[in-house]
Image (cartoon, rainbow, N blue to C red):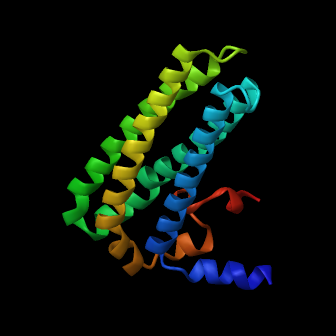
C-alpha cells in the first residue's frame, strides 16, 4: 500500500504539493506557538525541549526556502522570465524570515529555566512577526506560482523530491 501512496504523491502536480508543504509548515508553527504558550504559562515542555522543537521547525522552514531559492526558482525563472520580479520579492521575504528565525533561535536559546513575562513578550512578538510574514508570503507565492508549478514537468523533481517539497513525513 505504501508504494501506491508514493506513486500517487509522485504524480501530484508540483503546485499542489507546495500547498501541502505550506499547510504542514503552518501547522508546525502553530504547534510551536502552543508549546511556547504552555512553557510561559508554566505547564509545558522544559526549556531544552522547547529549544529543540524550535530548531526542528526552523530547520524545516529554512530547508523549504533554501530549496526554493536554489532549486525551484531558477527553473521557474528560466521557463517563465515574466516571473523574475515575483521570485525576487519571494527571495526578499526569505531573507526577512531568516532574520526572524535567527532572533527566535537566540531568544529560545537563552530561555530562563523559570519563565518570565519579559522573555515571554519578546518570544511571542517574534512568533507573531514570523506568523504574519509567513502567511502573507505563502499566500502571495501560492497566488503567483501554483498554476505555473502545476503546469511544469520536471522529471528530476519526480524522481527525487526536491527540498522545497519535503515535509517531516518525507524524511522517514
**Residue 32 appears left or right of 13:** right
Q: Nearer the viewer, residue 8 or 140?
A: 140
| Quarter of the view holding residue 150 | bottom left
From what the image shows, is residue 116 above or below residue 81? Answer: above
Q: Position of residue 128 (x, y in %)?
A: 44, 36
Q: How many marks?
A: 0
The one of 20 and 10 positioned closer to us in this rendering? 20
Q: On the picture, is 46 further left or further right than 75?
A: right
Residue at the location (30% across, 70% down)?
79
Residue 168, image x and y in percent?
68, 56
Up/down of 106 relative to 6, above or below? above
Viewer-closest of 121 and 53: 121
Determine the image quadrant of residue 8.
bottom right
Picture quadrant of residue 82: bottom left
Look at 46% across and 30% down and name the residue there. 126
Residue at the image point whose x is 70% and y is 81% from the top: 5
Residue 96, compared with residue 68, is above or below; it is above
Residue located 71% across and 25% down the image: 42
Residue 75 percent coordinates (x, y): 38, 64
Which image quarter holds the N terminus? bottom right
> On the rendered image, what quadrant is the C terminus found in?
bottom right
Point out residue 129 in the picture as x, y percentages from the top left corner.
40, 35
Amino acid at each position: 500500500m505504501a508504494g501506491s501512496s508514493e506513486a500517487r504523491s509522485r504524480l501530484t502536480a508540483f503546485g499542489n504539493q507546495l500547498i501541502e508543504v505550506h499547510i504542514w509548515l503552518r501547522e508546525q508553527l502553530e504547534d510551536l506557538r502552543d508549546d511556547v504558550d504552555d512553557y510561559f504559562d508554566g505547564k509545558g515542555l522544559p526549556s531544552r525541549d522547547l529549544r529543540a522543537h524550535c530548531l526542528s521547525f526552523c530547520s524545516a522552514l529554512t530547508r523549504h526556502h533554501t530549496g526554493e531559492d536554489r532549486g525551484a526558482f531558477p527553473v521557474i525563472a528560466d521557463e517563465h522570465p515574466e516571473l523574475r520580479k515575483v521570485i525576487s520579492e519571494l527571495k526578499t521575504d526569505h531573507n526577512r524570515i531568516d532574520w526572524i528565525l535567527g532572533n527566535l533561535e537566540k531568544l529560545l536559546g537563552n530561555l530562563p529555566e523559570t519563565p518570565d513575562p519579559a522573555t515571554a513578550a519578546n518570544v511571542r512578538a517574534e512568533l507573531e512577526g514570523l506568523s504574519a510574514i509567513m502567511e502573507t508570503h505563502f499566500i502571495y507565492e501560492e497566488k503567483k506560482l501554483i498554476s505555473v508549478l502545476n503546469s511544469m514537468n520536471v522529471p528530476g523533481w519526480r524522481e527525487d523530491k526536491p527540498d522545497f517539497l519535503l515535509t517531516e513525513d518525507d524524511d522517514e
